Amino acid sequence: MTELQHLINIAHSPIYNYVIPGVTSYLIDDKGRVRLFHCSRNHIEVVIPHSYRFDFSARVLQGRVTNLMFLETNDKSVDTYEVSNLEYGKEPGKYKITPGPVKRFLINKKTYHEGETYGMTHNEIHSIQFVKNTYLLIYESEERSRTSKILQPHINEETIATFKVEPWM
């Protein structure tokens, strides 16, 4: 039995359409620190740029992901975003948003293939894109922050509210 097949067999507590259509998040351990993500379709939807409350390491078990890192800059030629605090409300889909400052961000894009790993700290901001039938294994640290950051486009002196939780999520 392959490692992937073993993980699929022990995965439990799925959350379907996790953030975007077709992505399912499964627990591997009972503490919620090891998760298996599966994307069942080619992902074209945008995942709002965000940070996490924890650090993590990820390994692509099958398929590929493109990780888009948002790096703060003073370069006036790049796009602006409102940096808001997102406080988790103790269950998926429940959040409190506190608007924050407007800043500029460069985007650094890197694609990871089967067998490759990457990691992030809780204060880094990213978005992600999956290809169909990708499996991604995530190892999370203890909580490092009570809030996450989200980026929403800031255009013509207005923040465009792109973060939302839909009933299908």
Image (cartoon, rainbow, N blue to C red):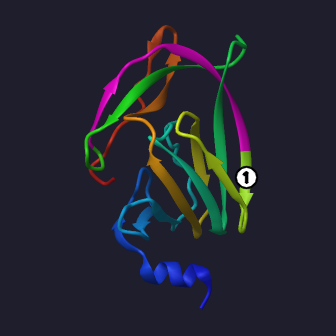
Residue 113: x and y in percent read 73, 62
17 vs 77: above or below? below
Decide if residue 151 is on the left or right side of residue 166. Answer: right
Q: Over which residues does the magenta segment extend?
A: 94-109
Instruction: Label the magenta part by its dominant secondary structure.
Output: strand
Question: Circle 1 sits on which residue?
Answer: 111
Q: Give the structural element (helix, strand or loop) at label 1.
A: strand
Residue at the (37%, 35%) spot, across then down = 146
Question: Disc 1 residue type?
Answer: Thr
The quadrant in which residue 69 appears is top right
Q: Is residue 63 above or below residue 75?
A: below
Q: How many numbered marks appear?
A: 1
Q: Is residue 102 magenta?
A: yes
Q: Looking at the picture, how far across and down is residue 2, in whole percent?
A: 62, 86
Residue furthest to the bottom in view is 1
Q: Is residue 12 magenta?
A: no
Q: Position of residue 100 (x, y in %)?
A: 43, 17
Of the pair 112 and 47, the residue shown nearer to us: 112
In the displayed structure image, the side of residue 169 where residue 135 appears, left or right: right
Residue plotted at (31% across, 46% down) = 166
* Residue sitting nearer the eye, 92 or 46: 92
Residue found at x 43% / y 64%: 24
Identify the residue at the far top of this view: 157
Seen at 50% across and 37% down, the residue is: 50
- Estimate how packed mark 1 is, as few (under 14), some (14 to 19) or many (20 or more) residues with alpha carbons within 10 Å: few
Q: Quadrant of the N terminus?
A: bottom right
